[in-house]
Amino acid sequence: MTPNETITAPKPKAREESATAESTSRLPKMSARDVSVFYGDKQALKNVSIEIREDRVTAFIGPSGCGKSTFLRCLNRMNDTIPSARVTGTIELDGEDVNGSAMDVVQLRARVGMVFQKPNPFPKSIFENVAYGPRIHGLANSKNDLEQIVEKSLKRAGLWDEVKDRLEESGTALSGGQQQRLCIARAIAVDPEVILMDEPCSALDPIATAKIEELIRELRGRYAIAIVTHNMQQAARVSERTAFFHLGELVEYGKTSEIFTNPRQQRTQDYITGRYG
Amino acid sequence: MSSSTSSRWTDREMTKRVRRRYRSERIFRGIGFAAISLSVLFLAFLLWNMASKGIGGFSQYEAALPIDFSKSDLFLDPATIKGPDARTTVAGADLSTAISKAAEAAYGPDADRMFSDAAVDRLTDAIVANPDMLTGTSTLWLPVSSKVDIAAKGKGDPAAEKMVSALEQKHALKRVFNTHFLTSADATDSSAVGVWGALKGSFYTILVTILLSFPIGVLAAVYLEEFAPRNHWTDAIEVSINNLAAVPSIIFGLLGLAVFLDVMNLPRSAPIVGGLTLALMTFPVIVIAGRNAIKSVPPSIRDAALGVGASKMQVTFHHVLPLALPGILTGTIIGVARALGETAPLLMIGMRAFVAAPPSGINDPATVLPVQIFLWSDEVGRGFIEKTSAAIIVLLLFMLLMNGVAIYLRNRFERRW
């Protein structure tokens, strides 16, 4: 399947109601079993098992230092860049072991894209920022092709109308919210299957945050999305599933509506009612 | 309650403390200003000293000399002076004696040594350009010897001063810009020396240095910073490179002598050996500057590139290196400027030889500007004093030019992130 076909023929937008019935028959997009992460001697994550569905937004919440970002970075092996980090357990993408020898880390990161906490556009033009991924993976056959991918990605990230006349300007000259949407456009330009977002709104003002959230709702169904957030209202607004992490453990994982209205664990109850965190 | 609070901020102890703080700030500013003033003073003194001494080296007195070629026994036939061999033919004749004889005839018996060695070259050029002058008498303006030149500039001995006043009475003396100084190489006669040979030698040497140390230094820095595993070996290498940067330059000269001349048998006194030796010296500076520049590239850029599936190599060469380049270039400027001004290691590998012809390649015997300055400052002839200062001015201008180019390049690559 060429990337263009995937872009022009999006998967049907799935909603929470229909997804519940449908997804029982489907394999999860990504699944983690007994994942533990050590930084040197310190254990940052303890035996986390979780499944991420293709058609849903999954939110990871929890207080600072609870391991939610660490877990997110395991999913596309960004922890490889930290020399002291050690990961145990299995993580699978479509049934393939992410840490296995058959999995190429460069391809994995193209399939599992990432948006970081601080907007980090390359100090290059807006066009180059989006075109970089498709170019290094050879996804465009011609200049025209590349321009189409850039336009499509920017449109999908809701940035096209704001930047279409100044694609040659530096990506770092945009405002914070625009930069973050540029980073999202950069991530979806390589047509990933999963998008990981590590507190994508924590450096943004409320208006920019609202735009990103709207964008996440629009991208839902097309990509499996996992989002780490400090903001519980945000998790409630954008996600269908929520996982609550505390002190390196996965305390509770379930439907967002249930986690927020009727948590099973006392610790979850304490956190969402603002007793700590 | 409120009165006690306000009194705490306005009581005498507090006022004194505040005043003390302002005073220490004033003192610090004063010291800083004094330091800056002192360094500006030093710089001004250096420049003024060099300029006042060296400016004379760029000018040269010339005297008019009527030459009767029919009496000069040159045995040159104007008809044979043409084509590519014309210069060789003319240079084969005894022009030096012809000038002495003509000078004696024009200005008396003491005048036989009043013209510079450079006058022979000038006469050669004149004859090649116009062979027909050999059939009659021509008056030429030729550079005078350093003795007369110094006297004309007001610092000569009585005999030379007498000759100068005699020439001035006949309006046969004039001061001109010394193009010979900028176009020729070393000579025994101080009025015939030039910096072009040393300038070319410096250029070739620095070219070899940059071509070797920049790519090797940058690649070493990239490997150590981005790819090398952190273990005892890389720690040892890091310590060694840091130490290498602090090794006295003369040691590098001895190393160059032992390795490049004795073992590899490269030509002595050649820019290639000088360049190799200086490259050894510059390399650690570039590695250290390069590593620091690479370290200062924000990790978020690396994450961003890795996040879209770039390989380590792509992250390094598409993102990290371009962003680190301004810093690397700054380090390179410092290293190369130091190499350009270096004398000691080049003495060791024979670049202090007397070289009368500018080098035409990196394998020809050559000297470099700082070594040339060192050699001239050692000469006994009084004419060399102003030539030494003039050569220093040329070296400073050359450095200024090179740094200017490097800073221009750095600013072009500088980007915000």
Image (spheres, rainbow, N blue to C red):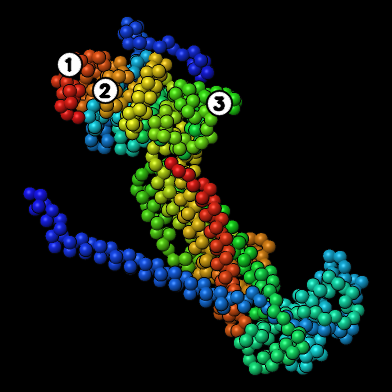
SS at mark 1?
loop
Image location of residue A258, percent across then percent down: 22, 14
Return the mark for residue B280.
none
Q: Residue at x 22, y 29 (%)?
A: A63
In this view of the protein, can residue B356 be seen by the observer? no
Relative to B388, say whether A127 is above or below: above
Q: Residue at x 49, y 13 (%)?
A: A9
Image location of residue A32, percent across then percent down: 30, 21
Q: Residue at x 28, y 63 (%)?
A: B25
Q: Earlier in the sequence, mark 1 or mark 3?
A: 3
Q: Are marks 2 and 1 on the same chain?
A: yes
In this view of the protein, can residue A156 be seen by the observer? yes
**Could you tell whether B352 is left or right of A226 in the image?**
right
Q: Residue at x 42, y 31 (%)?
A: A178
The number of numbered badges drawn on the structure is 3
**Three-letter amino acid code at the position of disc 2:** Gln
For label 2, the residue is: A233
Return the mark for residue A264.
1
Return the mark for residue A146.
3
Relative to B204, say whether B100 is above or below: below
Q: Are marks 2 and 3 on the same chain?
A: yes
Identify which residue, B48 or B222, lies in the foreground.
B48
